[in-house]
Image (spheres, helix red, strand yellow):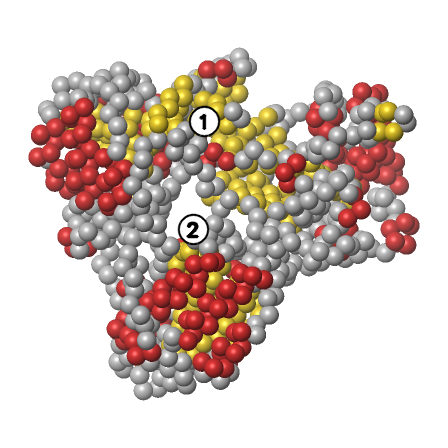
Amino acid sequence: VCRGRKWECTKNICDGTCTVIGTAHYLTFDGMKYKFPGECQYVLVQDFCKNNSGTFRILISNEGCSFTGEKCTKRVIILYKNGEIEMLNGNVCKLLFPFSEEFIIILGCLVNIKVSPKDSNDLEVMKSGRYYIILLGKSISVTWDLAMGVSVILKANFSDRVCGLCGNFDGIQNNDLTSSNEHLEVDPVDFGNSWKVNTHCADVKKISWEHALVSPLCNDNVLKQVMVETSCNILSEDLFEECKKLVNPEPYIDICMYDTCVCESIGDCACFCDAIAAYAHVCAQKGVIIHWRSPDLCRKYEVEGKELEMILAGNINAVIEFAFKNIGIFMLLFYFKTGKILDELSLDCVSPEDCPVCAVGDVKIPHGKRIVLSRDDPQHCRSCLCEGKNLSCVSCEPVEEILTLTTPALEDSELAPNEYSCSKMMDLAFLVDGSNKLSEEDFEQLKTFITGMMKKLHISQKKIRVSILVYRAGPTIYLGLKDIKTQSQMKTIVQNIKYAGDEVASAAEVLKYIVFQVFGKAERTNAAQIAMLFIASKSTGKVRSIIPALKNKKITVIPVGIGPYANVEQIRFIEKQLHSRAFLMSNMLELMDNRDLLIDYLCDLGPAESSPVPTPTMPNDIFPQWVLTVPPHFSEKSTPKSLDIAFVVEGSDNVGQENFNIIKKFLEKVITEMNIGKENIHITVMQYSDTITLEYSFREIQSKESIIEKVRSIPYQGGKATNTGHALDYISKHTFTSANGGRQNVPHLVYMLSSNPSTDVITRHPRSINVIPIGITPSANVQELRMISQPNSPIILQSYHTLIEEAPELVLQSCCSHKAWTERLELCNKPMDVMFLLDGSPNIGASEFEEMKNFVQAFIESADISNTSIHVSVLQYARENNLEISLNKPQETENLVNMVHLIQQREQGPTRLGE
């Protein structure tokens, strides 16, 4: 308010908006405009600033902008609460089906939720016109126009808590160019370069002011420059008159002229239209809607790229079946001229107001989803289920306190592995009828039947994963495939399911649900997908519409009818369409008697297990599963004689000095307990963030005193990135080589301590190097650590405070079991001649051939190679047979590995394996 010639302002902080336009233009939260034509991946905005632990990081890069003929687009990576979402228009799949004049279907692979956040309610994806909007919690939203425009909106609670290319959101423009090293830069190029994710990517070169002033806008193309200026000045003309009163067009005119000069044509080129659209979007945000597109100006395209048009005579099932078979879709959107939309679960056309969604404040809850309100308040805690539009809530039941492990959850061990009735790889969903046609007594018996059946199955994340759902009008899920529980915990979950006795139970709804929400969100290769459908009522809904999706996803449905009211017609239809076997039981007693029959049939559907073949890589039992009992105290007497161990610790800015000091104390405590010496255990220590720093090598004196003294003096390195992939690559190529002091005939073990997701790409390390990550939650990416550690298990801790107390014993337990390492060393120490035959024909792709070489190298690195022990030879066969490495070559590990690396695929026609 203006009073007495002075502005009187509130102290309220408004939401902040950061905008990226085109290839090089940025408008910060505080309104500063600058240009930075970077070609790497950069941190757009994050709250991991000033050594503070954060919750989100948004990365951005340009894709396809340097290649003629490719569509230029932004790639946006959102890391939020252990989740990862990617937005990219470079691999778009769109499909147009004009069924009739009523509607069309568009399929797109634009938003990819790679890993869901811890709380799925914190993520919502919406589409509005040509924009995708990602809502993260209640304070962050990301808007993308499918091309080169990205906007990030933050609530006021992030004020002065963020950093990156978007600035710090403190209301001051002058300090927006603060680099990742917390230095205030003058040149936007220096500022932008500091925020690149991969330090190996080239810096943007600075252009001198003198050159920038005399350099023409369109590189001496005067005619094009005149046309560009004329085209972009449309923003200052009458069409945008109303918007000019609210938004200054000059910055957008500059952006338009710069980007349009890059394009090969004028008028309808994407660069020009994106710049105009960016200004129009800001106008719309201010409440001024301008219909600026026309047949002569950036005409509107409903479908772009390579489209497939098919008229399928209005057969929606044929469309869905075709779509599932031909396109790996992320989103299926129906656009109706009548204004109707698609209900993804029912696949029916509904009005927006009829969409089955419950609302709690600003949070929208989909049909069938269960949430807990006021979880931390026992008096007001409510467990709520969304059914249609109605949210039904009951008081939270007190639960017994369950011991929370700081190590990976137990794989079930109530039976010995050979005593399970089924131990194949499969994903199994139990679908339980929740209607009143199943009495409460029968419902309890069915729960007992399921728990008894589960006891006979080898349930684990590596063998049989289990999901449990009860279906009424809609499904309710009680256990997901990715939920890691013990047998007793799963039994408790099943026993606590309450009897509902509803009038309706829709098998069609639950089958649609498992396709998208159960199997679709937990895909696993080489595992059978099976749904055991218990039917006790005349199920509503048409199962026919979901059959194509079940077939395409290769989901086997086993219908089990119980009692006199089971829908036999529907059961037989499922059996016929999906080529499965149905079971009809007159009552629960008969079902109980046939439990083993169902288990046998179920197990026959799983993939055949290959017979175990001894390999030179380390067996899984070297790293025993963690148990609830406290591990015994390890002394030097229990450790193996010879072992090379690398400790690799994260030293990024997200760790902080205080936590890094805890890491050093942890290292000191572990090393003190180890039997270190020239002929015993050797230690190397590395620190990584943006780069890798070798703090102590295998070539240095291998004594406890020397190593501990060095550990105590290791400086905290800091760095914006957590380049886990780069660290693993360095380890696999350099750490255990003879040149760096590694011993070739002893086991190699890596403990990698990390508390943050990797900011670079992780590639597979040699199997001869056993990596056991130590992850510190909540920020550590547990799935990423499990991938790195396979076939072993990571050590997961709740915080840095538990590192010193719990981790040393777990490390010693996994590294220094004398029996396990002795068995490992005796695997391959007998004299033998081994010949590898590599298929070098055109039938083998280049990547597959490299995998063969990797396998041979892993064997060489693991086996006892010497002139008096194991000899290795390699022959490549195609049209001709070529002896790449003969048995009389010097049998030295490093030499043989290098020779294998140099082998080139010959691809000389069909193979002559017989010769």
Viewed as shown, does residue 802 lie left or right of 241?
left
Amino acid tagged 2? Gln
Q: Residue at 19% x, 27% y: name it.
A: 443
Q: Residue at 50% x, 28% y: name it.
A: 363
Q: Which residue is mark 1?
A: 365
- Examine the image and state in which quarter residue 261 appears: top right
Q: Quick one: quadrant of the N terminus?
A: top right
Residue 271 locus on image (x, y percent): 73, 37
Q: Which residue is mark 2?
A: 783
Residue 857 locus on image (x, y percent): 41, 71
- Examine the image and state in which quarter residue 34 appears: top right
Q: Residue at 27% x, 47% y: name it.
A: 486
- Which element carries disc 1, helix, strand or loop? strand
Q: Can the viewer see residue 647 in this picture?
A: no
Q: Residue at 70% x, 42% y: name it.
A: 169
- Mark 2, other Cα within 10 Å: few <14 / some 14–19 / many ≥20: few
Amino acid tagged 1? Ile
Compute the Cα span from label 1 to label 2. 26 Å
- Which element carries disc 2, helix, strand or loop? helix
Nearest the eye: 785 or 407: 407
- Earlier residue among tags 1 and 2: 1
Q: Can the viewer see residue 688 in this picture?
A: yes
Q: Quick one: quadrant of the C terminus?
A: bottom left
Viewed as shown, does residue 725 lie left or right of 405?
right
Q: Is residue 647 above or below residue 41?
A: below
